[in-house]
Image (cartoon, grey):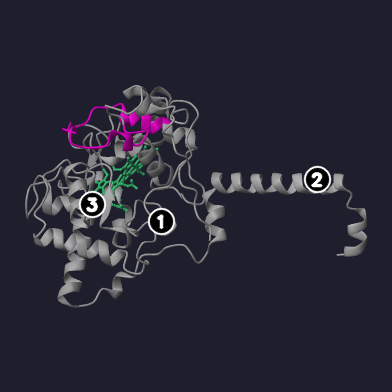
Amino acid sequence: MRKSEGDHFLTSARAAMLCACAIFLFIALSLLCIQNPNLLIKRKPFGRWKAPDTLSIPATKEGMLISYGRELVKHTAIYLGPKGKVKHTTNGMNCQNCHLEAGTKFFGNNYSAVASTYPKLRDRSGTIESIERRVNDCIERSLNGTAIEERSKEMQALVAYIKWVGKDVDKGSTPLGAGLWPIGYLERAADSSRGKIVYQKNCERCHGPDANGELATNGLEWRYPPLCGENSFNIGAGLLRLSRMAGYVKMNMPNDLTLLDKPPLTDEEAWDVCAYIASLPRPSRDLSKDWPDISKKPVDHPFGPFADSFSEIQHKYGPFTSMPSFKKPKELMLK
Ligand code: HEC
Ligand code: HEC
């Protein structure tokens, strides 16, 4: 650049213009990145978490436990479901129905950050939870079942597998792509009647007209899991929180279309279709012992009592952004 000439011409007005342009560009770029997750991913080619290769599971006793854990995540119902060969303690869903690709999929509710961040304090229980406790949480809520013994072979296998999935992640850190996509919030309430139309257009062909799913040919697990009704997750499950379900659906459903590159649903469609699913009946659960400190309830936890005066309906469907306890989802780190 012709620096000395440039200095000469940069009157304060021009400097201000340049500054404004730079700020505008920065904001536009940030917005673009938030809208299109793929941009983030392209900017961070080395940070994209990948699960270890299953071929690297050692042929030792520990390795066999890890492999059994993986099998349990993929086919939970065959072992622990209503006709399970080990026990009958869960509802027939598989962990993998929600923790996609055996808990290894990028933004598919994967287990990458479990080994690195547990045990940890969780506000729902108000206690420090081990991985075993967290797994039993999903068994009791997402699988609408009864907790399994922490010393059982099945629990040990699940924990061994989950630890193996996250074994290369530094202690205390959470990789980009862990868990669920932090979907942006709408300014309005999510709308279940619009959501029903989104459902019919995008979901019904697999999950069925009543969202009750379709059994697999073995009659033990689901080809398409139920989204409501007696075989679905109960009201205590994390997926019933609209931001959780919408983040899951946005990045992963319909599951036969290319997703991360071009999620088929808009954010609005994802919120609305989840409002529709959340409006359908499902098994109950006593939640009176959850959230011992009610001020820690997330804005989209749909059951009172609340520390504020907003209704259960608003805590279920929104709008959330106007609530004082609303916190913008954590921005994704690009470093
Ligand atoms: C109905 C869906 C569903 C099913 C089925 C399910 N989970 Fe989960 N699980 C979730 C959701 C939702 C979360 C919370 C994700 C979040 O808030 O980021 C979660 C969280 C977890 C976590 C903590 C993850 C973390 O990073 O903190 C573990 C561990 C876990 N589940 C294990 C299991 C296991 C093992 C099974 C099967 C026995 C299972 N889950 C079945 C939906 C499900
Ligand atoms: C092409 C078939 C297909 C379509 C279309 C589809 N899904 Fe799914 N969905 C699946 C399958 C298969 C799973 C379980 C994934 C697994 O086990 O690997 C699943 C899992 C789910 C789950 C978590 C498990 C549960 O039962 O609660 C939710 C929620 C979900 N889908 C919502 C939707 C929504 C909303 C739509 C429409 C926007 C949709 N799906 C469209 C096949 C589909």
Q: Is mark 1 within 8 Å of ligand 1?
A: no
Residue 288 included in the magenta stretch of the image: yes
Identify the disc placed on residue 184.
none
Pick the front one: 62 or 321? 321
Q: Which span of residues is magenta-colored?
A: 272-301
Identify the disc placed on residue 106.
1
Q: Residue 285, image x and y in percent?
A: 17, 33
Characterize the magenta stretch by its predominant secondary structure.
loop
CA gap between label 1 and label 3 equals: 27 Å
CA gap between label 1 and label 2 equals: 42 Å
CA gap between label 3 and label 2 equals: 52 Å
Instruction: State which image quarter holds ligand 2.
Output: top left
Count of labels in the image: 3
Q: Is residue 323 visible?
A: yes
Compared with residue 101, is residue 306 higher up or lower down, i.e. above or below?
A: above
Name the residue carrying label 2.
Answer: 16
> What is the crowding at mark 1: few (fewer than 14 residues within 10 Å), some, or many (at least 20)?
many
Residue kind at label 2, given as amino acid type:
Ala
Name the residue carrying label 3.
Answer: 128
327 relative position to 308: left or right: right
Pick the front one: 36 or 244? 244
Residue 273 included in the magenta stretch of the image: yes
Compared with residue 195, is residue 80 higher up or lower down, i.e. above or below?
A: below
Residue kind at label 3, given as amino acid type:
Ile
Residue located 29% across and 62% down the image = 115
